[in-house]
Amino acid sequence: MASRMSSDPRDARELLAFYMAAGVDAMLGEAPVDRMADEPIAVPPAQTDKPPATPREDSAGDGPVREYFQERRRPDPAVQSERKAAPPLPAPDVAATAAREAAKSAATLDDLRALLEGFTGCALRATATRLVFADGNPAARVMFVGEAPGYEEDLSGRPFVGPSGKLLDRMMEAIGLDRASAYIANVVPWRPPGNRTPTPQETAICLPFIRRQIELADPDILVCLGQPSTQTLLGTREGITRTRGRWFKYDTGSREIRALATLHPAYLLRQPLQKRLAWRDFLALKKALAG
Ligand code: URA
């Protein structure tokens, strides 16, 4: 059964919003192709000096397809020269070394945020809308750290403001905390396209920054939300079902503090029955903060 493309502009807007949410950040051609049409639709030839290559057919990755792609995306020579001027991404180990050096040099959280704003070593920065540095009170005794921002966080620049953030707010409220009495950040401060998991290289590049952020905020208690944050910050390979509810020691670089692993609110939204485990963890957190 063939389906026809809708001509309603609202549908087009919804489709574009869906593409953005899914992390699509480039187009392969300017002319739309209705792949659901009964008959092949002729695509007008590109207005370039070169004979256009057929997208994908001659694709070994670089070479002609890449050139074609750049050609089609070059309407404005000023933009193109800006693009050419952009430095190539460094190799991940070089970027991680640069991140370590830069993070060390930050004397305050404001310095660190400014450094991250200008840091080009992580590819995620190019696809994210904005840096998601932190929310809440940096002077708080407790700091929560998640994995990476999602769609709403990317748009607002604040961590945990989407559905899982709303649940986190309710969980904090249940033990008398809010964003004035807690500090919140992520291991990776840029949204991975389509909410994919950050790669180990991306995480390694961002790690010195979150470590320095924890050291500068200097909380008494660190709470790792979910497995990626727990494994990355607490250096364990064990799964979150084994580590949740457990207290770890965390060396901030200046002193040793306590760290608690718990389930990620996004997981709790998918598995509401597990909230009773998270509730136990939050009660333990409340007790520790009172102690
Ligand atoms: N999930 C995270 O780990 N962090 C956020 O900021 C939002 C969702």
Image (cartoon, rainbow, N blue to C red):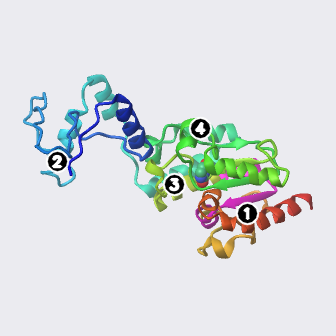
Q: Report which residue position mark 2 lands on.
A: 63
Indicate yes or no: mark 4 CB to ligand 1 under 8 Å. Answer: no
Which residue is at 21% across, 46% downward?
Answer: 36
Q: Nearer the viewer's eye, disc 3 or disc 4?
A: 4
Secondary element at image label 3: helix
Kind of element beneath mark 4: loop
Task: Compute the Cα span from label 4 to label 2.
Answer: 37 Å
Q: Amino acid at mark 4?
A: Gly
Please tell me in which quadrant of the rendered image residue 75 appears. Answer: top left
Residue 204: image location, x then y, percent? 52, 59
Give whichever of discs 1 and 2 has the lower sequence position: 2
Percent x, y of residue 34: 20, 41
Relative horizontal placement of residue 87, taking residue 286 as reference (left or right): left
- State the separation of the CA atoms marked 3 and 1: 19 Å
Any part of residue 216 in sight: no
**Secondary structure of the residue carrying numbered label 1:** strand
Q: Which residue is mark 4?
A: 157
Give the mark nearest the N terminus, 3 or 4: 4
Residue wearing tag 1: 251
- CB under 8 Å between callouts 4 and 1? no
Please tell me whether residue 216 belongs to the stretch shown in magenta.
Answer: yes
Q: Nearer the viewer, mark 4 or mark 1?
A: 4
> Marks 2 and 4: in contact by CB < 8 Å?
no
Viewer-side label of 1, 2: 2
Task: Decide which of tag 2 and tag 3 comes sooner along the chain.
Answer: 2
Residue extent of the magenta highlight: 211-231
Q: Is mark 2 within 8 Å of ligand 1?
A: no
**Lower sequence index among marks 3 and 1:** 3
* Cα–Cα gap, marks 2 and 3: 29 Å
Residue 191 in sight: yes
The disc, 4 or 1, on the residue closer to the chain's N-terminal end is 4
